[in-house]
């Protein structure tokens, strides 16, 4: 039989075990006390009392207690928001303060909370059970609650609650119009009207002069250069500044200044930040388009410009800023003058022939032709030939009584 060895420190065994026991008891008491101090206990107690006053004690007895959780397996989200926001599905508390307010009924008709949870729309940290953590007001958490107070801190020009529309567009990014998402709808119209795809790939197609914006919302805050920004140093603030005046955020950008208003810049920023890489199951977007819809008229116009007499200007990217209306090419941005009359316009503006100007461009064109549209000597010769053809067509249309492009001065 194995001989058991006595402890070498028999006098210390009992004091050590007693000390460990005391520590465990104290830790248990402290844990219990800390757990009792959570915000949600107060909010649940207050809501139960509100139900007693409004509907009676029997109805108040149906109010659940303890941590409440919704698991949305399709979105892989576990939300405990209803632990505090217990009135979400109750009628009768529509005018109460948060977190005791009834949720508006209409959004929940198509987005039942049992299937979508809360944070997929509202943002925030779903598994947290204390106010600051749950609302995402903690370090290193990049999905804060998209609340009215956050909209106020960003000084939104119109609806202070509009930031939530960024999450709406995660599922509805291919809709032309989304009910209730006025800011996002405005931004989508601007993308169409200003021809942003002439320079940027968006949702899989577009030009390559500028960066691909399909997943620009994935960009981490550390990837932004905030050195030229005054005030808030956030991705949203950077995009707003960039849309209002591109060079205020990026000194050497060639993006033109469209002179967007504050409302337009904020709407475009929301749209850009909504373009994220999120796997949304088909059941959540049933009936919604899965790609950007384009009308037959838009497709035909695009094909006509790519294959018509002005196709060279489209393929090189010149049409991004310049129309060549004599050849049926319309610039989406229309920042620069119509090139239909460039042969005479350059002479009057710069005192140079079109040949000399393309060899040694000045001003904005010196930047564009050195960094964005880099032409070989052979391509410059083709450009000169095409510009002369455009001017000849302009003169022909003028003599024929058509409405050619007016010379720019």
Image: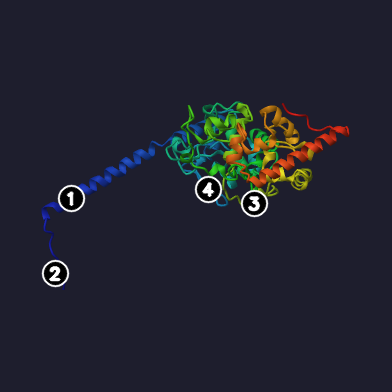
Mark 3: few, some, or many residues within 10 Å (few <14, many ≥20)? few
Residue 400: name its quadrant.
top right
Say the numbered circle drawn on residue 77: 4
Where is residue 76 shown, x and y percent of the image? 53, 50
Q: In the rendered image, which quarter contains the N terminus?
A: bottom left
Residue at 57% across, 37% down: 88
Q: Which residue is mark 3?
A: 283
N-terminal label among 2 and 1? 2
Q: CA distance from mark 4 to mark 1?
A: 45 Å
Q: Secondary structure at mark 4?
A: strand
To which residue does mark 2 refer?
3
In front of the other: label 4 or label 1?
A: 4
Q: What quarter of the picture does the C terminus occupy?
A: top right
The residue tagged 1 is: 16
The one nearer the camera, 45 or 381, is 381
Tell me: 5 left or right of 213: left
Mark 1 vs mark 3, CA separation in Å: 60 Å
Of the residues under marks 4 and 1, which one precedes in the sequence?
Answer: 1
Q: Earlier in the sequence, mark 2 or mark 4?
A: 2
Label 2 Cα neighbours within 10 Å, binned few <14 / some 14-19 / many ≥20: few
Foreground residue, 402 or 366?
366
Relative placement, left or right, of 273 versus 293 is: left
The answer to whether any part of residue 52 appears in the image is no
Tag nearer the camera, 2 or 3: 3
| N-terminal label among 2 and 3 | 2
Classify mark 1: helix, strand or loop.
helix
Determine contact: label 2, label 1, CB under 8 Å. no
Residue 58 in percent (x, y) is at 54, 37
- Residues under labels 2 and 4: Cα distance? 57 Å
As measured in the structure, the alpha-carbon distance from the residue carrying label 4 to the one carrying label 3 is 16 Å
Q: CA distance from mark 2 to mark 1?
A: 25 Å
């Amino acid at each position: 039989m194995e001989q058991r060895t006595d402890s070498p420190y028999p006098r210390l065994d009992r004091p050590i075990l007693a000390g460990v026991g005391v520590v465990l008891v104290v830790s248990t008491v402290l844990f219990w006390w800390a757990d009792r101090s959570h915000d949600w206990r107060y909010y649940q107690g207050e809501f139960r009392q509100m139900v007693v006053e409004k509907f009676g004690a029997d109805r108040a007895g149906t109010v659940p207690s303890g941590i409440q959780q919704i698991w949305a397996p399709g979105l892989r989200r576990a939300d405990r928001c209803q632990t505090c926001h217990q009135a979400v599905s109750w009628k009768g508390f529509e005018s109460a303060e948060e977190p005791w307010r009834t949720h508006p009924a209409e959004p929940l008709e198509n987005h039942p909370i049992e299937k979508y949870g809360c944070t997929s729309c509202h943002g925030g940290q779903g598994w947290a059970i204390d106010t600051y953590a749950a609302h995402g007001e903690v370090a290193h958490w990049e999905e804060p609650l998209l609340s009215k107070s956050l909209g106020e801190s960003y000084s939104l020009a119109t609806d202070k609650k509009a930031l939530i529309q960024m999450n709406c567009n995660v599922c509805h990014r291919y809709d032309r119009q989304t009910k209730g998402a006025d800011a996002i709808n405005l931004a989508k119209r601007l993308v169409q009207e200003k021809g942003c795809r002439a320079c940027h790939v968006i949702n899989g197609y577009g030009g390559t002069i500028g960066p691909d914006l399909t997943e620009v919302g994935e960009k981490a805050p550390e990837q932004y250069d905030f050195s030229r920004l005054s005030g808030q140093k956030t991705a949203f603030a950077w995009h707003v500044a960039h849309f209002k005046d591109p060079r205020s955020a990026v000194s050497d950008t060639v993006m033109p200044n469209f002179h967007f208003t504050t409302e337009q810049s904020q709407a475009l920023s929301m749209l850009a930040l909504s373009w994220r890489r999120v796997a949304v199951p088909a059941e959540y977007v049933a009936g919604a388009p899965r790609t950007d819809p384009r009308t037959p008229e838009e497709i035909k116009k695009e094909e006509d410009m790519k294959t018509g007499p002005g196709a060279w200007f489209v393929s090189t990217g010149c049409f991004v800023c310049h129309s060549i209306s004599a050849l049926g090419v319309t610039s989406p941005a229309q920042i620069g003058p119509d090139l239909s009359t460039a042969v005479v316009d350059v002479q009057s503006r710069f005192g140079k022939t079109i040949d000399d100007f393309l060899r040694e461009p000045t001003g904005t064109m010196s930047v564009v032709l050195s960094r964005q549209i880099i032409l070989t000597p052979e391509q410059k010769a083709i450009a000169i030939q095409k510009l002369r053809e455009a001017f000849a067509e302009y003169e022909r249309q003028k003599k024929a009584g058509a409405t050619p492009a007016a010379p720019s001065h």
